[in-house]
Image (spheres, rainbow, N blue to C red):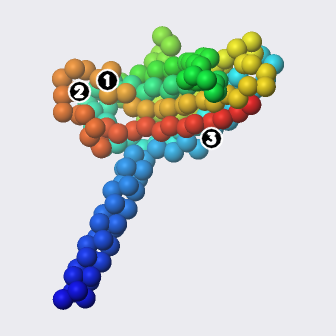
Amino acid sequence: MIDRVARVFGGLVIAVLMALTMVSGAPAQANGVELSAFEVVRGDDGVTLNYSVDFDLPRGAEEALNKAVPLYFVAEVELFRDRWYWRDKRIAGATRVWRIVYQPLTSNYRVTFGGLSQTYATRAEAFAAMRRGVNWKIADAGQIEEGARHYIEFSFRLDTSLLPRPMQIGIGNAPDWSLSVERFYRFN
């Protein structure tokens, strides 16, 4: 009797562990976003960031883009200084927002960034324009304290809060709209 209970319990433990492994591994694969390059450069003029994001557009977002619904991508970075006596001090922050929309009449993609728009003939060209950030200045040299420890929190995501209101209903945390990557980087 005890042997039988031990086998059933052992099988149950194995099943639970396998389920947890599959659940914890699923979001990383479903998300499909990879930060292929990430470099923080501290120079005489301040701190700059270089990054490159590789991703495949989720099925739901791809269908919306094909129907001329604008998609918004946001890159955010915040710079903090460590403090032992209180919460860490936020030194600087920066945000970049891209709007991409398919124009069916001309079969082109329009990417808007910082008030400037550029038209691309293919989807690959349009997404290549927003996948990389080069020499993005996030802090001046005077904001960085010598001898102090600093860190950066970076995120790149598809922002569903900027979609048209009727589309936001029911999206929530749907995997068809999940596209984000985060990075924590510490430097002196």
State the image quarter where residue 94 is shown.
top right
State the image quarter where residue 25 is shown.
bottom left
Nearer to the camera, 17 or 28: 17
- At mark 2, the secondary structure is helix
Where in the figure is residue 4, as x and y percent of width and height?
A: 21, 87
Residue found at the far right of this picture: 44
Are discs 1 and 3 less than 8 Å apart at CB? no
The amino acid type, in three-letter code, at marker 1 is Ser
- Mark 3, Cα crowd under 10 Å, few <14 / some 14-19 / many 20+, is few
Are discs 2 and 1 less than 8 Å apart at CB? yes
Q: Which residue is denoted by mark 3 in the rendering?
A: 37
- At mark 3, the secondary structure is strand
Where in the figure is residue 160, as x and y percent of width and height?
A: 32, 28
Where in the figure is residue 99, as x and y percent of width and height?
A: 41, 22
- Mark 1, Cα crowd under 10 Å, few <14 / some 14-19 / many 20+, is few
Query: N-terminal of the two: label 1 or label 3?
Result: 3
- Residue at the image point whose x is 38% and y is 55% from the top: 24
The amino acid type, in three-letter code, at marker 2 is Gln
Q: Which residue is denoted by mark 2 in the rendering?
A: 168
- Residue at the image point whose x is 51% and y is 25% from the top: 76
- At mark 1, the secondary structure is helix
